[in-house]
Amino acid sequence: MTTGRGGDPQGEATGAALIGRDALIADVVAFIEGQGHKRVLTLLGPGGVGKTSLAEEAARRVRDRPAVDGAGVRRDVAIAYLAELKAPDEDRLHHLVLRALEITDQGVDRPLPVILDHLRRREQAGRRTLLVLDNCDHLLDDVVDLVERLLDEVPGLRVLLTSRETLELAKELVVAVPPLALEPSEGSGDADYRDQSGGPLSDAERLLVQCLNDRGMRLTPDDDWETLRRLVAWTDGIPLVLIFVAVRLLGGMAPREVLEHLDKGRLLHARAGGRRSRRQGLKTHHPSLTAMMDDSWRWLTPQQAALAARISVFADGFTVGDVEAVCADPEVVPAGRDGAEPSGDVRVDRAEVADLVNDLIQKSLIKRHGPGKLGQLNPVREYAEARLVERGEPESMRTRHARYFRDLAKHYADTWYGPREVELLRRANDQMANFLAAMDWCAETASDQARTGLEIVFHLARLRLPFFFARLGEWCDRFARFLDLVPVEPTPERIGSSALLGWIKLCQGLPEQAEIHLRHCRDLVAMTDTPADDVAPVVFLEGAWLMEGTGTPDCIEVLGRAVELFARSSPEFDGDRGQFLLMWALGAGFWGDDATGTRIAQLCLDDARAAGAEWAISWAQWARGLAPLMHGRPVEAVQWFRAGLETQIELRERWGSTWGSEACFWALAAIAGRLEAANAENGARQVAEAAAILMGGALAIQRDTHVNVIGLVPFRRERDRAHATLERVLGRERFRECFDKGAAMPAVEVHHLALTAHIVAGDTLRRREERYANASWSTLTPRQQKIADLVAQGLTNQQVAGQVHSSRGAVEQQLTVIYRTLGVTDRIALTDWIKRMHDGTSGSAGADGWSPRR
């Protein structure tokens, strides 16, 4: 089951939260698995009644229930939590659903067509989906439009919604989620669920008892059960209100004190009717949640109330450190406020925050979401937001929140190039709801914080987060949005953002759009006194565009210049330098000679290993395989590609593994071609079949993730070369059969094939490559050296024969011996080997020997 956060659902559905809900959950599951014409179920109810927990539990049961012939279909389940959207935003809504469905989208299409295409292909593969949209009531129009479109185009889809209002959809079944029953039942024989006389408890009473038990407070026959019943009746059976009642009792108040304080004695003095007290003269739907929240607030100290209100600016989970940074008052209040500091009369000192947070946890105004992770339930957050407005602090607190997450993004971007690389990427992704909330605030015209928003987008892109977690399309939108909002000035953030946006466009296979951003960068730099060749981001984009957009060896010098410029910068740009070094290695591998490609790729790999950055190492391994592939050593190349791919699969990243599978089939195709040239036809066909299957699978993954490799010149060249080789070895019909087989494979099987495809009859090639790597000039006789040198100068065999005073046949015999000795296959490979030897490069091994793994 997946969620809009890419992690666990919001709050585990504990036994206490689901007391009294078994029948309702069973009905929801039966509806989802049924075959009726209605395909949307809306769980309708007030805040605090437990709609989210109920939906999560129903979704779990649907996910875990095995499919039975004729009695149901196994469904994929995705949950999108919409509470983080503060206002209607159709694009954000679609991106939330995209992430909940775990769709990897690196392309340029809008999210809704991507969602539709993904769900349709799921159904074609026999997979059905349950989509849960939680907290829809503030986004009704956008949700209705989305759901209607999904239902029209995806026949097997089921949608489960939670809302305080009905959506009035034609295919909607509305199920009211009632408060817990106030009358007793025989639902539990557990002693914990019996009153002092041994009688059964109502569901509402059971929930209260369970909350007390969970915190170590056990009720006994001597407790005031009659007042407890009246107190439970006052709550209207709303679970969240019952939790707040438990807080009062756990805090040492007697049931009679709690009831008198809440209800001013009206229930306490009402006449009892029957075995249970009946409420007389009170409205059937008493606004108990609002009353309880009002009362909870009255019990807070001024500092607790101020902090609880300020915490509402967090869109999702937070830590005590986050609260200290955002919500505490500065040690010295500045004389002139800039709008970013709290303006209330009550001070919250940083040293007090940890104790205040603990107080709020005890009062259930903050919940623990995991180790070190805190949060507010949605009804509590909504109430606290209203109190923040009363305090006159919403703008100042949201601005502080945005600036804090800007600084956090910069910290991650400045420090990722090291052993904590993947940890920082995942921490940033865990905090994505807060980053997005900060950016949304910065994009509001009233906030005057557009530059802060651009900085957040910029630094998270420097972290490479949109690549690791497949958010390229969304990041393009955010870059474009803030570049439109901020003044057109040559600031480092604007130049850097324009360059990064151009780089993303290149990665999406759109070199013509990347060129537009390159021109914009040059125009910005022209506003300054600095030459464009001295601005590292601009030089980088220029080199990347030359490498991937036009395909020219000139990129090597330009990318090397970008690395040099960043090497002169402060340590905070180590990550940027490391990323540029990788691009330099790719450029040299694709477009350089063997010696240059090997040297720069090894430099990149050594640098990443010294830093200990695991994801960077995997990409450097990928780059390290390019020179061997381009210069006739595909067996060596595939080992490097596999080493990088293996790490990327282990990291569960969604970017490099797509490109790694592509490179593996390039190398396997090259191996098949070399085997064919060596007359090893059976081995060539077997390797070619594996390569063709892998090609079909790799291209299917790219289609599914909207990666446009074919738009990049070197990738198109290598794919076309592999395709031609495989069709030649296998024949067009057999190639298509293998390709289609791979295209139908799931991604996990494609990756497994890329890592394990057996190189049949490849030992001869491996030995030849090893000879090539270890050979030296001294292994040739003086006569062979002279013949080899003349061939490298471009002379024909007949011309060489004239120079060495021999026959053409004798020269050809000598060349055969030379090829075998050096491990090369033809005149071109011999010429390349001699150039490497003259350049001082000994073979293909790195400084620490040939070792694709760390």
Image (cartoon, rainbow, N blue to C red):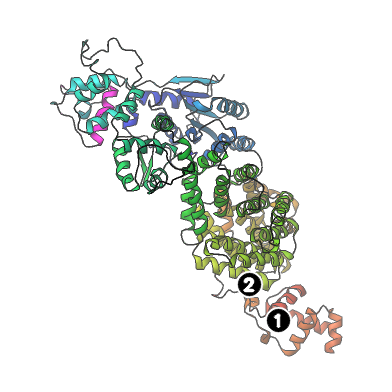
Figure check: 758 above or below 282: below
Residue type at the position of mark 1: His
Q: Is residue 616 visible?
A: yes
Q: Position of residue 821 (x, y in %)?
A: 68, 80
The image's mark for residue 838 is 1
Q: Secondary structure at mark 2?
A: helix
Residue type at the position of mark 2: Arg
Q: Is residue 101 visible?
A: no
Give the CA separation, mark 1 to mark 2. 14 Å
Residue 782 in magenta stretch: no
Residue 199 in magenta stretch: yes
Q: Position of residue 181 (x, y in %)?
A: 31, 19
Figure check: 7 above or below 236: below
Q: Which residue is mark 2?
A: 599
* Mark 1 / mark 2, whichever is N-terminal: 2
Q: Position of residue 388 (x, y in %)?
A: 42, 33
| Residue 591: quarter of image | bottom right
**Do the CB atoms of the residues marked 1 and 2 lie less than 8 Å apart?**
no
Q: Nearer the viewer, residue 374 or 8?
A: 374
| Residue 768: quarter of image | bottom right
